[in-house]
Every structure is written in C-alpha cells, then in structure tokens.
C-alpha cells in the first residue's frame, strides 16, 4: 500500500476505536488494507453506545454483499441492530431522493434530517460510514465533493453526529486524496492492529495497538525519542492517549526507557488510568506518569 504524506503526519490520527461523537474522519483503503475491519469496529462501537448507525457502502456491492462483509462485527449485536433498525444500510442515491443530482446543500439537509430523527427516537448519536465511491456512481464533480468535505464542519459542532469518509485510493487521484486527508480533522489508521508513532516537538504519540506484532516499531520509536533534539521547554513525553491495547512487552519497553533516560533527558508518560496501572505494576515511578481521565 502506498503512503500518503498527509496520512503519515496527520495530527488527528487515531484508531477507529477512539472515534467519538462529533468526529469527521478520513479513511484511505485499498486491497492491502480493505477497511472492512475498521468498518465493522465502527459499526459495533456505535451500536454498543446506543447510536443510530447508517452505512453507505461501496456502490458496487449489493446490500446482501455488504451484510456479508459486516459479519466481522459481533453477530448478535449487529443482528439485533438490523432488527431494531438501529443499523441501516443505505446509498447516497437513496439519501438525496427525490433529487437525482448531488449537491452539498441537499446532502447536508438530509443528514440534518436523519440526525433529528435519531434524536427523536432516543439514540445517543448518529454515525455514518460513507464510501466515497458514490462520487463516480452519481457522476458528481470532484471539485464539488471536495468543497463539501472542506465546508461540512457545521454538521459536527453539537457533538451528536460523526462520519467516516472512506476513499478507495485506486479510484481517486493522489492529489485529491492528499487534499482530503488534510481537510478532515481526524484521520483513521487503515486497519485494526496497526501502530503509528508520530514525533512532534518533544512528544512521541503512540497511536493504535502496541502488542507483540508492533513491539519492534515501538522500541525503535522510543530509542529515537531519547536521541531526538530536546524540546524547547519541558521534558520529553510519550503520549499513550490514542493507544488502544498496550501489551506487557511494550509496557515493559516503556518502563525500561524511563530507567535508561539520563537525568538531563527526563521522560514523562501521558496516559489513561488503565495504562498507568499496568505501568506501575511493571515498576514505573508514579511520579513520571501524567494520568488523565478524559
């Protein structure tokens, strides 16, 4: 899978499990990372949180084929979502009816209407997964679609609505993908079990799953942190707030980093209470853990 420059350095990168209400996220997929596990996790999380979930799948797939692809989501929860109409499979063609031509205003109007209906039915939120294959399916203008993406912020301001815009990189020019990645406040990792380590001004952001499969990537990033230029002010920091699973081996590597850090290169760890408990059990000094409940 090719790598988008904007994707590798996007400040809003997060795993799909951390996607919350009010998020507007970019997802890029292809044959190497087809995105079905990300979609299944997105659907499952929404159902578990009591949100209405609408999936606008790839236009080339029938509803039966899309249901089959979603079997990765836990069966009983997804099945009951279908039965209660909490989970809905739709298409952009159906959404904008009776209009046949896409306009941003028509799509926004319908999303606002769907959000209002979800509120009236007592749902905790509305989340949609929109495969951007609808652009070619409707013969829509790329510039019009890009303008919609850049100006859609008003849909998310009250924190009720969230949306994934999923782009098949084989169907869009790379400059469009780069621009759309930058236009979204959030950027999703391409698959479950993925780990990305981003360094920014003295802080190493550990994003995704830190487990046996990604252990070497994490240890290389931790070693790089110790040798990176000192931040303008304050200590070096390892930020785990966008880390999902933290395995014992990776947690041990973090504790060893703290032990190896010389006095003039202090390292602190910003983390959840859950991760802090594991690190303390492995010998981390509680004084260097900045625990957040947010």
Image: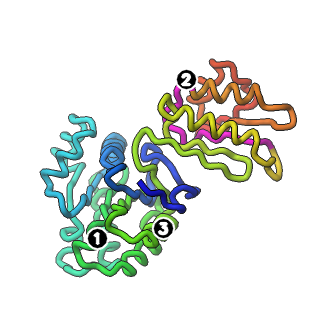
Q: Earlier in the sequence, mark 2 or mark 1?
A: 1
Instruction: Give how far across and how far down residue 278 sits, in percent.
Output: 59, 23
Q: Which mark is residue 280?
A: none
1 in relation to 45, above or below: below
Q: Which residue is mark 1?
A: 110
The reply to whether residue 35 is in sight is yes
Quadrant housing residue 149? bottom left
Q: Which mark is residue 178?
A: 3
The quarter of the rendered structure image containing the C terminus is: top right
Query: Mark 1 against mark 3, which lies toward the viewer?
Result: 3
The crowding category of the residue bearing disc 2, from other C-alpha atoms within 10 Å (few below 14, some 14 to 19, many at least 20), is: some
The magenta stretch is 235-249
Quadrant housing residue 288? top right
Instruction: Give how far across and how far down residue 236 sits, in percent.
Output: 75, 42
Q: Are marks 2 and 1 in contact (CB under 8 Å)?
A: no
Q: Is residue 38 left or right of residue 237?
A: left
Q: Mark 2 falls on what kind of element?
A: helix
Give the camera-side residue of 151 and 34: 34
Colour scheme used in the picture?
Answer: rainbow
């Amino acid at each position: 899978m090719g790598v988008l420059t904007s994707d590798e350095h996007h400040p809003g990168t997060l795993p799909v499990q951390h996607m919350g209400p009010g998020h507007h996220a970019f997802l890029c997929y292809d044959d190497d990372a087809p995105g079905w596990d990300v979609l299944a996790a997105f659907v499952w999380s929404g159902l578990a949180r009591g949100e209405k979930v609408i999936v606008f799948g790839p236009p080339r797939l029938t509803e039966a084929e899309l249901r089959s692809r979603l079997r990765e989501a836990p069966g009983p929860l997804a099945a009951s979502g279908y039965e209660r109409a909490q989970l809905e499979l739709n298409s952009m063609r159906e959404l904008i009816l009776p209009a046949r031509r896409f306009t941003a205003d028509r799509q926004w109007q319908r999303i606002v209407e769907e959000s209002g209906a979800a509120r009236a039915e007592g749902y905790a939120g509305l989340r949609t997964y929109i495969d951007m294959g609808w652009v070619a399916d409707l013969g829509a203008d790329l510039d019009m679609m890009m303008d919609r993406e850049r100006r859609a912020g008003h849909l998310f301001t009250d924190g009720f609505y969230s949306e994934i815009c999923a782009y098949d990189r084989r169907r869009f020019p790379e400059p469009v993908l780069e621009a759309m990645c930058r236009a979204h406040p959030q950027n999703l990792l391409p698959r479950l079990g993925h780990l990305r380590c981003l360094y920014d001004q003295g802080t190493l952001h550990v994003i995704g799953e830190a487990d046996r499969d990604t252990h070497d990537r994490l240890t290389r990033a931790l070693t790089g942190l110790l040798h990176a230029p000192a931040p303008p002010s304050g200590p070096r920091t390892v930020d785990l707030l966008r880390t999902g699973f933290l395995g014992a081996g990776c947690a041990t590597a973090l504790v060893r980093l703290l032990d190896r850090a010389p006095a003039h290169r202090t390292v602190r760890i910003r983390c959840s209470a859950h991760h802090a408990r594991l690190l303390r059990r492995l010998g981390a000094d509680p004084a260097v853990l900045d625990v957040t409940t947010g």
